[in-house]
Image (tube, rainbow, N blue to C red):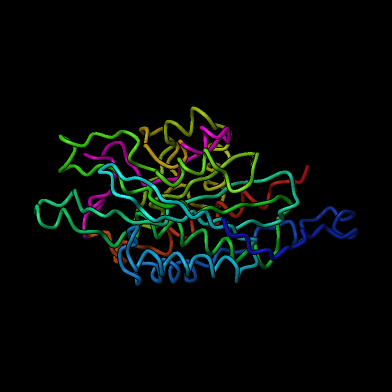
Amino acid sequence: MILACLLLSCGNKGAGDQLTGTVSEADAAPGFDADSAYVYVETQVGFGPRVPNTEAHRLCGDYLVSELKRFGAVTFVQDMVLTAYNGERLSCRNIVGSYCSENKKRVLLFAHWDTRPFADQETDPVKQRTPIDGADDGASGVGVLLEIARQLGLRNPEVGVDIIFFDAEDYGVPEFEKATHYVPDSWCLGSQFWAKNPHQPGYRAEYGILLDMVGAHHASFYKEYTSMRYSARTVERVWNTARDLGYGKFFINAEGGSVLDDHHSVIERGIPSIDIINYDPERDLGFAAYWHTHNDTMKNIDRETLKGVGQTVLEVIYKEKAL
């Protein structure tokens, strides 16, 4: 584990803010820049598929570390060798950026940064064995979190915030090998590792928010089942905030299905967490038609959706009060 120490202090309100009855600039969440987030998504896709053991994966990981440092985060890198469903050894990294490290009250934000090594939802058997761009499935959540990290570097909220980019989320058993390789724990390998080996011993957070596939046109974010079971209060807070900000068309006020995702591992760590994910229980597979295909490209990424998710999460964070 590599620790780059760049310590930041958490700003407090001035006395004038405490005495006035009006909302000060320090009380308001910063504006989320959708153009900036779009560029972060585009930059990741530009490296190519970010599959462990590839040059694109290595270069993108270096980029994510450098961006978190540039935005003033205390950074941690968990280097690990994970075992895929087929026995292949994967060189992986969980990448962590922390703000206000001394603050005991913390919020955890996370997404996966790897991409699916198989386009196993393609109908062409040849295409099924090639990796995808993962513009939405991977890059969109990371892009939103990078823009949030940039805003955190400009002005700290009252609570500590940790951002984790989990690796090897999407290396689960492909459809074309399920008959011979059924491995139920083959997904979310990076977050499983972190749950057993957190970047800081005894790490705790009040709650966690996972962003997965959060950049598509006309995205639908239903209240995911596991999120409601373990962190219903956070779900309601996030969905109500989105509605108040005018993003209710994305955040659907209805319960959806259960999704196997990185929040399961974080919950097992004892941190109640939710999943903001584009999953509509009325669709055939639940996910968008381009899911795990070669159509998961930048053409699907919409700035308005990125803005809706990012601004909502920023609003939730900046309304948190210190202990």
Answer above or below: position of 202 versus 134. Answer: above
Q: Using the image as rendered, state which of residue 77 and residue 123 is in the foreground.
A: 77
112 relative position to 20: left or right:
left
**Residue situated furthest top in the rendering:** 229
Residue 24 quadrant? bottom right
Answer above or below: position of 68 versus 243. Answer: below
Answer above or below: position of 218 versus 259. Answer: below
How far across and how far down the image is residue 153, in percent? Answer: 65, 66
**Majority secondary structure of the magenta segment?**
loop
Q: Residue at x 51, y 50 (%)?
A: 110
Q: Using the image as rendered, state which of residue 234 and residue 243 is in the foreground.
A: 234
How far across and how far down the image is residue 160, in percent? Answer: 69, 51
How far across and how far down the image is residue 225, in percent? Answer: 42, 31
Residue 282 quadrant? top left
How far across and how far down the image is residue 322, in percent? Answer: 76, 46
> Which quarter of the rendering shows the C terminus?
top right
* Residue 61 counted in the magenta span: no
The number of callouts visible is: 0
Q: Residue at x 64, y 42 (%)?
A: 201
Q: Residue at x 53, y 52 (%)?
A: 164
Residue 71 quadrant? bottom right
| Magenta region, residue range | 265-294
> Which quarter of the rendering shows the N terminus?
bottom right
